[in-house]
Image (cartoon, rainbow, N blue to C red):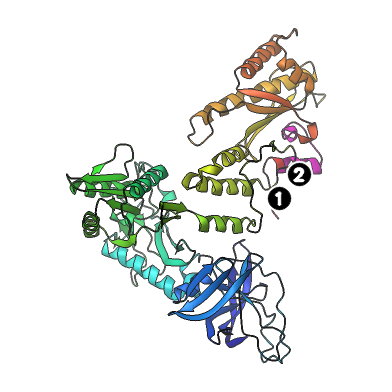
Amino acid sequence: MFSTYTPINGRKLFMGNSATSNIVGLGKVVLKMTSGKELTLIDVLHVPDIRKNLVSGSLLVKSGFRLVFESNKFILTKNSHFIGKGYVEKGLFKMNERKEEGSSRKRTHEVASGDHQRDEEPRRSKRAKIAKTFGPEFLTYVLENEPRTINEALSSPEAPFWKEAINSEIESIMQNHTWELMDLPPGSTPLGCKWILKRKYKADGSIDKYKARLVAKGFKQKEGLDFFDTYSPVTRITSIRVLIAIAALYDLEIHQMDVKTAFLNGELDEEIYMEQPEGFVVPGQEKKVCRLVKSLYGLKQAPKQWHEKFDRTMLSNGFKINECDKCVYVKSSHNSFIIVCLYVDDMLIMGSNRDVILTTKRMLTKHFDMKDMGLADVILGIKISKTSDGLALSQSHYIENILKKFKAYDSPPAKTPVDLNLHLAKNKGESEGQIEYSRIIGSLMYIMNCTRPDIAYAVNKLSRFTTVLEGYSDANWISDSKDTKSTSGYVFTIGGGAVSWKSSKQTCIARSTMESEFIALDKAGEEAEWLRNFLEDIPCWTKPVPAIMIHCDSQSAIGRAQSGMYNGKSRHIRRRHNTIRQLISSGIISIDYIKSKENLADPLTKGLSRDQVYCLSRGMGLKPDN
């Protein structure tokens, strides 16, 4: 299989599920195609643990090949010459290879940009193998996860691309005079920094460019010392859609530009020191630090400083800022107009004619380091396509990635987003996959907000089960014969995790189990009221905030709370009864019965068996460390 091979020790392959596998070798593989031509793959990683053969479509495109997908097949060409083709089998594109004489069948390789699994084991050739020391013949041809460090990037098969991106970032920083080296002043603490390495993809999934960012560890900044105000406006996705609709209606060209190292353009007013970046420590000045003169990615004030700089530039060149969206800039005269929409460092430019667009591009290039991307193709992961009817927006590549990520790629399509006969209810048992469920809803929300209003109701309905705030109340009536006071406990959860809890001795003596449960319920209601008021001011929380469900395992206490009158003689119980009744009638709380073995507040009032503690702890979001 390998035409050249070099053993490797100590390197790991990081996969999408955070698992790692050993890389035992690196070499070159020559595939003989049905066209009679050969496809040479360099830097092929030999990973015995992975039972799949993958060829990266994006890396083929990067190497000058062209991939054309047509219905259920794909065609591979280079310089207009046919190289090979393949067909879909069970959701995967399989490349056809030429059969060799004496071989039952040559191995079929999958072309993918991710981690598709192969459905069948490769058949071994009957010919004698030359190399016997490679281990199991399972190869992976692509490493798509981003490197975590410079060393990892520069030791990967894509090292030349990462090196170019890193050097480009450092050159931009130096040309911008972002910092100056100096000794650290006494009493000052420098911020750390980190390289963030990412691949940027086109709408078809092929790699557009390799991007490196030097990011300061701004989470260590202290308000009032090295930053003050951080607010920076961001354009609404609605604004982008409206502008694209206007462009389609009036047949306007939409151009796109990218601001290279946008956040490096803002000037700093504060004294901020940072450690020298990894891989670029100046020899002989290792103990010196970088005094930041201009903004850097990661600083808390960086977005604000960049936006203020861009505002000043646009205003000084005759643009006006839209009053409703501070990231949209307009300039008009009696016979022409130009509109610029900025989203952090990406911008859309549209105008009444190409001349005003080109003039604006030259102006922006004069003030900032810009990349002209020509006619708009992709913005924020949204593909813009010109059709006979106007302009179309789609996120097909993003949707495919979500389906693959959550292992739903082969799922049959639904006929409608919401089944009319399906009624959803909260899971009464142990929570399963709550975090993954929340991630799925978050991914669907981005699609819904950008291009898919048809799934808005379905996503909204499902999202209600990720943000439910509910409480559990319990009491233990005089468990100790030497102590006549009971124990109260409550716990509140959001999204499968406990956010508020308390276990305390009651301050008054309860005459019965019902009274002790009532006192505990009153404390839980008090906390529920505070939580509800708190959530009223949280912008992303569903409004109006619904009544908070409190689960209680005492049916007598629930019956008494829902009763309109209380005939007990204890004044302190009567006061609590009135309080709970008022919370229920005003829609702040509602009370529901739950079995004691399912009451999450049970461990807060008494000792329980190991199995009970384990089960209820998982319900509170606690996970075992194994």
In-front residue for pair 213/254: 254
Q: Main secondary structure of the magenta part?
A: helix
Residue identified by numbered label 2: 614
Callout 1: SS = loop
Query: For the point 41% across and 67% down, which residue is it?
Result: 209
Q: Who comes first in sequence, dot 2 or dot 1? A: 2
Q: Which residues are magenta?
A: 599-618
Residue drawn at x 22%, y 50% is 313
Dividing the picture into quarters, in which one does residue 328 lie?
A: top left
Residue type (three-letter) at the residue carrying disc 1: Pro
Magenta span contains residue 269: no
In the image, is residue 293 above or below residue 152?
Answer: above
Task: Write down the quadrant of residue 406 in the picture.
Answer: bottom right
Q: Secondary structure at mark 2?
A: helix
In the image, is residue 31 above or below residue 500? below
Q: Are marks 2 and 1 in contact (CB under 8 Å)?
A: yes
- The disc labelled 2 sits on which kind of residue? Tyr
Residue, disc 1: 624
Q: Position of residue 69 (x, y in %)?
A: 53, 68
